[in-house]
Image: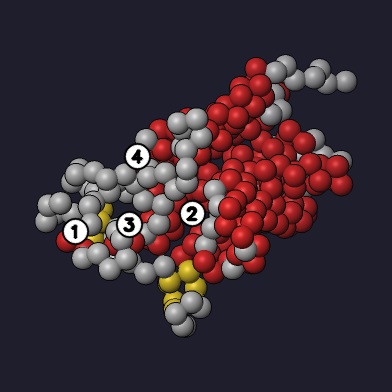
Amino acid sequence: MTPHHWIHDWKPFLIQFSDTIGIRYYGLAYVLGFVGAAFLLVRYARSGRSQLPEAQVGDFMASLVVGVLLGGRLGYFLFYRFEEVVRNPLVLVRVWEGGMAFHGGLLGVLIALVWYARARKLPFLHLGDLVCTVAPFGLMLGRIANFINGELWGRVSMVRWAVIFPQSGSPGMPTELILPRHPSQLYEATLEGLLLLVYLQLRLWRSSAIKDHPGRLAGEYLVGYALARVVCELFREPDASLIMGLSRGTFYSLAMVVFGLFLIVRRPRARS
């Protein structure tokens, strides 16, 4: 370790009332992510690019919120902490301790989309395109919140921008003995969040894909996210055991590539 590495000392609270109660950056990231998504969906509706009426944006967002929160929470324990939830199922409700998984949230959103499409008789693939063009905004904020929380840190590195995360050391270990690590949370915020957000917004506003090829934007998102996640996993410290020699984030992303490529190459049905 060299003296120029910054020691992470940020607290997870924007406003703190007690040791465990307050306004957390992570929770704020979710709120702002959902608000930003709703704002974009309203813009889509007003511009005529969306089949989701503006009046239904609130109901649609409510179903997505449930899907993200339930799917992300259940997916975290099923994919990464299964043994823990088997020993003590009550950990599922201890939300103040954190624990959300992107791939679980994705499955939750998928179920919510199926339900909403059937309930409102709207095209499932079109709704999927809409969601995938707004999702990167929330992901970007979530990864930034991960960095502020000092969690999900990267692998040990001596690059000048590496950060010393005190929680990455053993309990009681002096800070000067803790090795610096890649701020992989910020890499993910940039690649999985900002880059994909800009790309998909350009695709939505400057192409006719959302009208002429339902599902294509969703496919591009799935492939883009998976590739970005695989790159970021090279710098991120695995937070669970490996599967076939791959980090779980990489392994679960492989299915996203397959499904995403299918949506990209499939031919849309001819309009009657």
Which amino acid is tagged 2?
Gly
Question: Is tag 2's residue or tag 1's residue first in the polypeptide sequence?
Answer: 2
- Say which of 216 and 42 sits in front: 216
Residue 235 has which mark?
A: 4
- The residue indicated by pointer 2 is 142
> Which secondary structure, mark 2?
helix
Residue 177: mark? 1
Q: In this view, does 213 lie above or below 150?
A: above
Which element is circle 1 on? helix
Q: Residue at x 55, y 29 (%)?
A: 254
Q: Distance between the residues labelled 3 and 2?
A: 20 Å
Look at discs 2 and 1 and give the one toward the viewer.
Answer: 1
Task: Specify which label sits upstream in the sequence, 3 or 2.
Answer: 2
Question: Where's residue 235, x and y in %?
Answer: 34, 39
The kind of residue tagged 1 is Leu
Q: How crowded is mark 1: few (under 14 residues within 10 Å), some or many (20 or more)?
A: few
Q: Which three-letter amino acid code belongs to the residue tagged 3?
A: Ser
Q: In this view, does 50 lie to the left or right of 157?
A: right
Q: Mark 3 points at which residue?
A: 168
Residue at the far front: name it: 87
In this view of the protein, which residue sits in the foreground, 259 or 89? 89
Type of residue at label 4? Phe
